[in-house]
Image (spheres, rainbow, N blue to C red):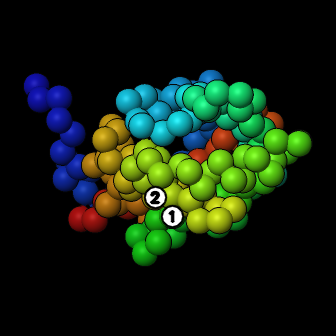
Amino acid sequence: MSDTLDLGDFAGTHASARIPISRAFLNRLVAGALAGSRTPVRAVDIQPIAGDRFDVAITVSWPFVPQLHATFVIEQQPIFPASPLLVLRWSFLGLAGGLASRLLSHFEQLPPGIRLDGNLVLLDVPVLAAKSAVAPMLVHIKALELHTLDGRAVVELEVAIPE
């Protein structure tokens, strides 16, 4: 028996799913994306908050820079397949906010699929998922949205595999 998934075996499938993702799993995904990258970000702790928001604590490798705290709000959902970008608007909290904004301009090397544009973070969903187990499904995504509850992210997904 082969371990590879042949999606042709599922031709004609149309499915919708609501997938809750725990805070712990979300943080493991981010830690995996950061592993081996050359970004100054050493650790990220993400706390989903109801209302499509995330509170985030960021630890950087620069000396004398305290842990940074930011809020990310979902600004724009991806539109598949035309524009599969999830756009988040960030704002830093506390006195370190001004410093953090200046430091972000030095983030030249972010993991593939993540781009900064002013106070926006653009997440390219296909690039971020390309090396994951869900990569073969990417071409079949018709809709994908990310929402939040307290302590959980929720992915709402629609896929269709043609006949």
Residue occupying the far bottom of the picture: 82
State the residue at coordinates (32%, 60%). 139
Lower position in the chain sequence, tag 2 or tag 1: 1
Residue 99's disc is none
Q: Taking the image as drawn, is residue 8 in sight?
A: yes
State the residue at coordinates (72%, 53%). 101
Residue 141: horizontal and vertical position, in percent? 41, 60
The vertical placement of 152 against 138, above or below, is above
- Say whether residue 61 is left or right of residue 139: right
Residue 154: horizontal and vertical position, in percent? 64, 44
The residue labelled by disc 2 is 124
Kind of residue at disc 2? Asp
Q: Quadrant of residue 58?
A: top right
Mark 2 and mark 1: span between their CA atoms? 5 Å
Which one is in front, 124 or 42? 42
Please say if the residues under marks 2 and 1 sit with CB atoms less than 8 Å apart: yes
Which one is in front, 7 or 30? 30
Q: Secondary structure at mark 1?
A: strand
Residue occupying the far right of the picture: 94
Q: Taking the image as drawn, is residue 23 in sight?
A: no
Q: Within 10 Å of the Cα at label 1, are there few (<14), some (14-19), or many (20+) other Cα atoms?
A: many
Q: Secondary structure at mark 2?
A: strand
State the residue at coordinates (63%, 51%). 104
Which one is in front, 118 or 10? 118
Residue 142: horizontal and vertical position, in percent? 44, 65
State the residue at coordinates (53%, 36%). 40
Which one is in front, 123 or 140? 123
The residue labelled by disc 1 is 85
